[in-house]
């Protein structure tokens, strides 16, 4: 009897879907089923573990000795189990970062794990990783940096052959790979086999991406490819994990260049007139940096901060890519693991019960007055069926009648995304005190839109669709009460061990702006900025001779107006005779990840004066800016 009932239900469901397909035309640009399935994963993990883990850097220069790589307690299964406990469905490993060190024993170079102490050169961390993912039912992805600061031939055609060989190696020997991740960092200073020079490439022409995509499609036909321009998944335009409040899955990939940091706004919103459907991916690290640094242990994002990012990524029609970097022993830190686990607990508690159950729905318009598109499909807890209105409506709404007065503070809305993304503006009202009150006014919906607002008590809800392309449609809706554990406490990671007292400091040169004291006022929220016409140099009189172990620079977090990319720093006892540079380098990835920069000197120095030079401003802008500068 049960089997007969199942067959009947299947026939009825199939008939409904057939009728919808017949009477509801899809948009010109729609996702494939595999793209929808990918986005439904919602949460993906990233593992930044490589040479930088052992050198305490974010971007290695490429001259790091293989002997430095030696994780003594490596446990890849710990990574995978922690990720799974946090709700992660797929994990991407940095098989090679910009410094060129390979986590597998590549046949095409020597800068790899095969020449490290790890397992006496017999280790293969890529294999350990993919095997662990298979064991615990997690999909695996690989990141292979197009930029290689170690390789002697980078910037020349021969390097492309090397890169293709390595990509082929990775995609041929480790089973099914679900995602190949290519970022936009390319060209600049590097070791380059001992040349120690700057190499600039044209990212539009140097990498033959179509050929690279063909390699992926041939060897891993189900794998999705991520880059600034897709073709399957695109960068969201920041490394904060946040999609635009308006976010379209459609975009014009021909309008985006590889390495498109300057096109962040376009990437962050998508394009309602876009001709390509490319899923947006919001990448962010659980720590301030992408690699593990012990001095950032106090900056691990709390469970509530992760939940906040979930609403701003998955809840805005994108995918949440969260980096959890293991330490130099090869283990994820227990603080990171605990935060990730509690993050899942909060989400599970929030979305365990859909309070809309038992509700009835009426709509101001139903497509062709047909039961095939009836408003009841909005609350049937299925994304396969949907309500739709006629094409010619200027504005439509539907009302939810709950069985009783209910308290809720979260709402879910979904479009039948297989037919395209349509809704461009909507608002939500609740009926309280005998009148309609607007509690949310938003733009796009897409596969999933999550709304947060103060708790309301009502038994009637109205959703008004104001602007849309084609006929508007909603496939699913839910209302929920947030977990009591969701408490937002966001504190900037500004704790500096041994921070030197600044009370008697004075900035003495090259700062005509009278508010320059803001640079050293201890306030990490006040921004100081100055227009410059030459390399910026700042001298600080410390008031007395002091022993100094390092410095920190806090950039603006909005990636605008004068963040410093390269620096040099000097010390003096009299303010006239200066030492050689006691530290000189770059703040790696500060364009996309403008976090506090901490630099340790090779040894302690003594002096009464410090001179800090900004040798290069981000994208060669003509402003220099600080939130704060200090010594320790």
Image (cartoon, rainbow, N blue to C red):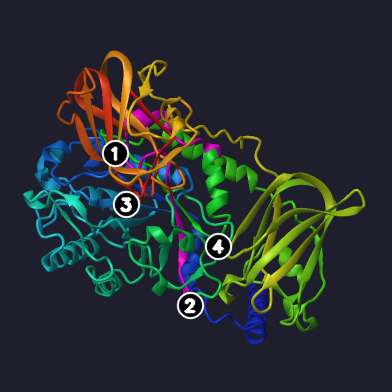
Q: Residue at x 16, y 47 (%)?
A: 62
Q: Quadrant of residue 584?
A: top left
Question: Helix or strand or loop: what does disc 1 sit on?
Answer: loop
Q: Which residue is mark 4?
A: 247
Q: Which residue is mark 3?
A: 620
Q: Position of residue 268 (x, y in %)?
A: 49, 59
Q: Which residue is mark 1?
A: 75
Q: Earlier in the sequence, mark 1 or mark 2?
A: 1
Determine if the magenta segment contains residue 307.
Answer: no
Q: What is the CA distance from the residue labelled 3 to the residue labelled 2?
A: 33 Å
Density class for disc 1 (Cα within 10 Å; few <14, some 14-19, many ≥20) is some
Question: Helix or strand or loop: what does disc 2 sit on?
Answer: loop
Q: Earlier in the sequence, mark 3 or mark 4?
A: 4
Q: Are marks 3 and 1 in contact (CB under 8 Å)?
A: no
Q: Position of residue 594 (x, y in %)?
A: 40, 43
Density class for disc 2 (Cα within 10 Å; few <14, some 14-19, many ≥20) is some
| Residue extent of the magenta highlight | 276-304
């Amino acid at each position: 009897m049960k089997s007969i009932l199942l067959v009947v239900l299947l026939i009825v469901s199939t008939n409904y879907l057939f009728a919808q397909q017949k009477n509801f035309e899809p948009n010109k640009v729609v996702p494939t089923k595999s793209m929808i399935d990918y986005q439904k994963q919602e949460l993906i993990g990233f593992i930044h573990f490589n040479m930088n883990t052992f050198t305490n850097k974010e971007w290695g220069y490429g001259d790091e000795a293989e002997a430095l790589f030696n994780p003594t307690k490596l446990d890849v299964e710990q990574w995978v189990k922690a990720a799974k406990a946090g709700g992660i469905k797929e994990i991407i490993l940095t098989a090679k970062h910009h410094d060129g060190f390979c986590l597998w024993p590549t046949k095409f170079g020597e800068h790899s794990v095969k020449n490290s102490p790890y397992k006496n050169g017999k280790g293969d961390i890529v294999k350990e990783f993919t095997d662990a993912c298979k064991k615990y039912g997690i999909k695996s992805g690989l990141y292979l940096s197009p930029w290689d600061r170690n390789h002697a031939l980078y910037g020349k055609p021969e390097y492309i052959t090397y890169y293709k060989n390595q990509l082929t190696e990775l995609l041929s020997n480790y089973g099914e790979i679900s995602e190949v991740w290519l970022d936009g960092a390319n060209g600049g200073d590097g070791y380059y086999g001992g040349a120690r020079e700057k190499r600039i490439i044209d990212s539009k022409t140097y990498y033959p991406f179509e050929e690279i995509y063909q390699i992926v499609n041939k060897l891993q036909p189900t794998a999705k490819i991520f880059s600034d321009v897709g073709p399957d998944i695109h960068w969201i335009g920041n490394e904060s994990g946040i999609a635009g409040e308006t976010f379209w899955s459609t975009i014009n990939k021909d309008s985006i260049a590889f390495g498109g940091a300057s096109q962040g706004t376009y990437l962050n919103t998508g394009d309602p007139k876009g001709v390509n459907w490319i899923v947006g991916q919001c990448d962010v690290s659980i720590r301030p940096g992408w690699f593990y640094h012990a001095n950032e242990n106090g900056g691990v994002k709390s469970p509530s901060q992760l939940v906040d990012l979930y609403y701003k990524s998955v809840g805005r029609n994108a995918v949440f890519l969260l980096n959890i970097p293991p330490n130099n022993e090869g283990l994820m830190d227990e603080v990171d693991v605990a935060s990730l686990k509690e993050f899942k607990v909060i989400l599970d508690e929030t979305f365990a019960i859909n309070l809309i159950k038992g509700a009835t729905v009426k709509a101001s318009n139903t497509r062709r007055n047909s039961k095939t598109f009836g408003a009841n499909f909005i609350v049937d807890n299925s994304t396969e069926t949907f309500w739709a209105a006629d094409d010619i409506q200027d504005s439509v709404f539907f009302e939810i009648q709950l069985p009783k007065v209910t308290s809720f503070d979260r709402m879910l809305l979904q479009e039948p995304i297989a037919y395209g993304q349509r809704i461009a503006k909507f608002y939500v009202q609740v009926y309280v005190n005998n009148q309609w009150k607007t509690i949310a006014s938003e733009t796009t919906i897409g596969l999933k839109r999550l709304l947060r607002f103060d708790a309301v008590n009502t038994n009637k809800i109205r959703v008004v669709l104001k602007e849309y392309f084609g006929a508007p449609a909603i496939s699913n809706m839910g209302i929920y009460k947030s977990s009591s554990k969701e408490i937002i406490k966001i504190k900037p990671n500004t704790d500096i061990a041994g921070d030197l007292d600044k009370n008697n400091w004075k900035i003495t040169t090259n700062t005509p702006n009278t508010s320059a004291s803001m640079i050293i006022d201890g306030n990490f929220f006040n921004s100081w900025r100055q227009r410059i016409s030459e390399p910026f140099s700042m001298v600080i009189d410390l008031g007395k001779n002091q022993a100094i172990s390092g410095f920190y620079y806090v950039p603006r977090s909005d990636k605008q107006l004068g963040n410093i990319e390269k620096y040099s720093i000097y010390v003096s006892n009299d303010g006239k005779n200066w030492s050689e540079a006691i530290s000189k380098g770059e703040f790696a990835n500060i364009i996309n990840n403008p976090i506090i920069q901490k630099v340790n000197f090779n040894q302690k120095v003594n002096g009464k004066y410090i001179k800090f030079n900004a040798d290069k401003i981000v994208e060669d802008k003509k402003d220099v800016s600080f939130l704060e500068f200090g010594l320790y």
